[in-house]
Amino acid sequence: MANRFVLNETSYHGAGAIKDIVPEAKGRGFQKAFVCSDPDLVKFGVTKRVLDVLDGEKMAYELYSEIKPNPTVENVQTGVAAYKKSGADYLIAIGGGSSMDTAKAIGIIINNPEFEDVVSLEGVAPTRNKSVPIFAVPTTAGTAAEVTINYVITDASKSRKMVCVDPKDIPVVAFVDPEMMATMPKGLTAATGMDALTHAIEGYITAGAWELSDMFHLKAIEIISRSLRGAVDNTPEGRADMALGQYVAGMGFSNVGLGIVHSMAHPLGALYDTPHGVANAIILPTVMEYNAEATGEKYREIARAMGVQGVDGMSQEEYRRAAIDAVKKLSQDVGIPADLKEIVKREDIAFLAQSAYDDACRPGNPKETSVEDITKLYESLI
C-alpha cells in the first residue's frame, strides 16, 4: 500500500509573509474573506495586522471571533451560520490551533452540510467535498494547524475532545510570519513550543512513521531544541526558527499520526481546559520512558538532534535516557510544570484514561497500550 503525503498548495515563510495574502486572494479570484480569530488576538491588535493588509487593498471581509481556547461544537455551528450570512467565498484563520480548527470545521461543513451536527466529523469522516478555501496565518509556534489535515473540537456535553482527520480540510495557503508571533507571552511561547516538540518526537516514533516523515521530524526536533529558549526570550532569531520548526513538524505528523501523549493530553483540555501544550510537555517524558522499548534506535537520533554529545558511544539504555533527560531539561528551562498534581483530580483518572484510550491518536502509539497502562501513567504524574 502506498504512503500518502498531503501538504499546502503554497506556503510563505519569513517576516512580512502576510503581505502576500492580497496577491494570493486576487490571483484566485476571491471576493470576500470570512476571518476567524479569537477574542484576545482581536483585543490586543494582532488580528488587526492582517485586517490592515486587507483594508489597504480594499479587500472585503467579515470578522468572526466567537472562538474559545478549546473550540466547541457550538463555536463551530455559530460560525457556520455566520459564514452563510456573510456572502464570503474563502476563510482566513488567524491564530493558534483554536482559530485554525474552528475555520477547518466551518469550511468542511459549508461544503458538506450533512455534517452540520459537527460530532459526526470525529475520526475520519466520509466527507465528499473539499473545504471552503482557507488561508492560514499562525500566531503561535506550536500547533502547525496551518499545514495539517487534523482539527480538534470539544464536545462540551460529554467533556471530551473530538479529533477529526480529513485531507480535504488542509489550508490551501499558509502564511508563516514570525512577526505575527512576536507578541506571544513567555508562557504561551513555551507551551506551544513544547507542543511542537511533542509533534516532532511522537511523529518520529509513531507506528506509521517512514523515511519521508522521519526527515521532517528529525529536522524539526533539531530546530526546536536550539531555538525554543530564544523564542521564549523573544529574540528575533528564536522566533523565526520556531516558526519554521513547528511548521516542519506539522509537515510530518499530519501525515503519519501521533500517539498517547496527545491522547492523554486531549481529555485534560476537555475536562479542565488545560492548555494543550502544557499538558503535552508534562506528559511527554513519562510516555517516552513507557515507549522506549518499542523505539529501536530512534532515541539515539532524538538525543543527537537535541544536541546531546557522544551518542554514538552510548549504550541503548544510555542514549534513551539521554533523549528523555534532554526533553526534561528543555521543558524545565522554559518553565513548564514537572507534573499534573495541580491539574488532575484522582477521582477523574478512570474517565481520563478511558477517554485517552478512545482518542484517535492512541492507535498510532508505537507500543500497544491499554486503559490500565494509561491509568498508571496518569497516576505516576500526580
Image: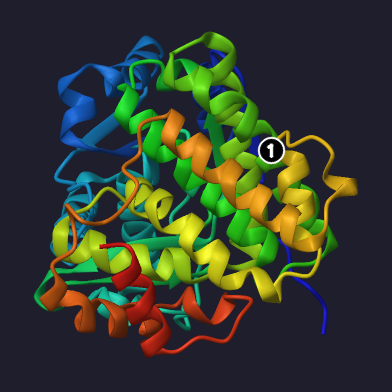
Residue 111 is drawn in which quadrant? Answer: bottom left
Q: Position of residue 74 (x, y in %)?
A: 13, 63
Q: Position of residue 168 (x, y in %)?
A: 53, 65
Q: Position of residue 23 (x, y in %)?
A: 56, 23
Q: Position of residue 234 (x, y in %)?
A: 44, 13
Name which residue lies at 79% across and 50% down.
301
Residue 54 is drawn in which quadrant? Answer: top left
Residue type highlighted by circle 1: Met
Q: How packed is label 1: few (under 14 Cα within 10 Å), some, or many (20 or more)?
A: many
Q: Is residue 91 left or right of residue 364?
A: left
Name which residue lies at 67% across and 48% down.
322
334 or 135, which lies in front? Answer: 334
233 or 244, which lies in front? Answer: 233
Whether residue 114 is visible, yes or no, is no
162 or 305, which lies in front? Answer: 305
Q: Secondary structure at mark 1?
A: loop
Furthest-right residue in this view: 312
Q: Is residue 10 left or right of residue 69?
A: right
Residue position for label 1: 306
